[in-house]
Image (cartoon, coloured by chain):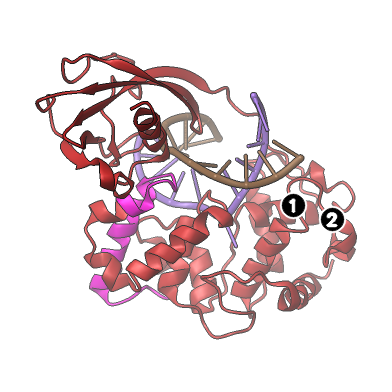
Chain colours: A red, B brown, C purple
Amino acid sequence: MLETEVSADLLRWYDVHARSLPWRVPPGGNAADPYRVWLSEVMLQQTTVAAVIPYFERFTTRWPDVQALAAAPEEEVMAAWAGLGYYSRARRLVECARVVAQRGGFPSDEVGLRALPGLGAYTAAAVAAIAFGQRAVVVDANVERVVARLFAIDAPLPAGRAEIREATDRITPALRSGDFAQAMMDLGASICSVRAPQCLICPLSSHCAGKGAAEAYPVKPPKKAKAQRKGIAYWIERDGHVWLVRREAKGMLGGMRALPDNGWSARTDGMGAPPVSAQWLEAGSVSHIFTHVALELDVWAAKVSHAPQGDGEWWPLDRLDEAGLPTLYARAAALALKGE
DNA sequence: AACGCGGGGCC
DNA sequence: GGCCCAGCGTT
């Protein structure tokens, strides 16, 4: 294989077939705004493009630049992130914005970017290449799949990642490496897809060692079984308000607003009592699948005349959509409200 | 190296 | 129901 031919063929394809996305500039265009590239890359960590687009639009409308985001209360950013998942990203997003605003802008090289909170090997390389035109080896799940097929790399992941990275390095061009990275992602998202790859129309098929057997690559390890958990969430209402708490910073849904619960997320389930004595009604049950836990959450509802034990706040029901409840609790709340 | 960490879309 | 996704930080 002639490595330079791979990138040349891919970039020719990208010049015609590049997806148009809100954080992108057209192929070969001017440099993209580092703030928008960084924000999109963080949102896209383990998250699909379709899920990110509306969040990206809302964030950039509300906080158009890194100074604006740095000045925002962390609580507001967490609430705006609600529903997108992996909430430690939102906390690090604010932390990173404040560091960047303080130093007067993003570092323009991969090493400097890698030192920022929330930027790992992938994101630092992506921002360096896409926003700053630096040559960087960008390996995400798309690139991993495309390259494993292109070179027929059958070493199982995660050990095979070293080999995949070396191969990606060999085909990454010195010029337009940001376009190259995005082209690899577009190829992986469309033609070189996880299921039913379309080798017949692939611009890299003439170079591809895995062609025709593409679905055999990359070799992934078996999944672990999900733990099953049960819990109770409490819908506590008074005068058109509901009692909300804030979860601990670490762990499941860390730092997010929530309904009080009986401790379902604790490692050792020490199931606690309701935070207030009341006449409870069963509002129903929510089945929710996390990455490594399957939760069945019963929802108990009551109207009370005084505040429960512990920290919390009365939140107005007519502004509940602004509370920033993660999806689990948004579903539990919908259940309780439907039962009224 | 392995694990914890969301949620939605696809088949 | 299982798989996947523009991964990161911690242990």
Counting from the top left corner in percent of width and height, residue C2 is at 66, 28
Counting from the top left corner in percent of width and height, residue A114 is at 42, 61
Counting from the top left corner in percent of width and height, residue A221 is at 66, 33
Q: Quadrant of residue A339?
A: top left
Quadrant containing the C terminus of chain A in the rendered view: top left
Please name the residue shown 28% across and 31% down the image.
A259
In this rendering, is residue A128 above or below B4? below
Which label is found at residue A26? none
Residue furthest out toward the left:
A306
Please name the residue shown 49% across and 20% down the image.
A227
In the structure shown, which secondary structural element does the residue marked by tag 1 occupy? loop
Does the segment drawn in magenta span residue A17? no
Q: Quadrant of residue A157?
A: top right
Q: Which residue is mark 1?
A: A193
Question: Do pointers 1 and 2 mark residues of a single chain?
Answer: yes
Whether residue A70 sits left or right of residue A135 in the image: it is left
Chain hosting mark 2: A
The three-letter code of the residue at mark 1 reads Ser
In this rendering, is residue A326 above or below A232? below
Counting from the top left corner in percent of width and height, residue A268 is at 33, 16
Please name the residue shown 57% across and 52% down the image.
A48
Residue furthest out toward the bottom:
A30
Q: Which residue is mark 2?
A: A198
In front of the other: A339 or A274: A339
Q: Which residues are magenta?
A: A79-108
Q: Are marks 1 and 2 in contact (CB under 8 Å)?
A: yes
Does the segment drawn in magenta span residue A87? yes
In this rendering, is residue A323 above or below A243? below
In front of the other: B9 or A200: B9
In front of the other: C1 or A33: C1
Instruction: For marks 1 and 2, give the CA distance.
Output: 8 Å
Quadrant containing the N terminus of chain A in the rendered view: bottom right
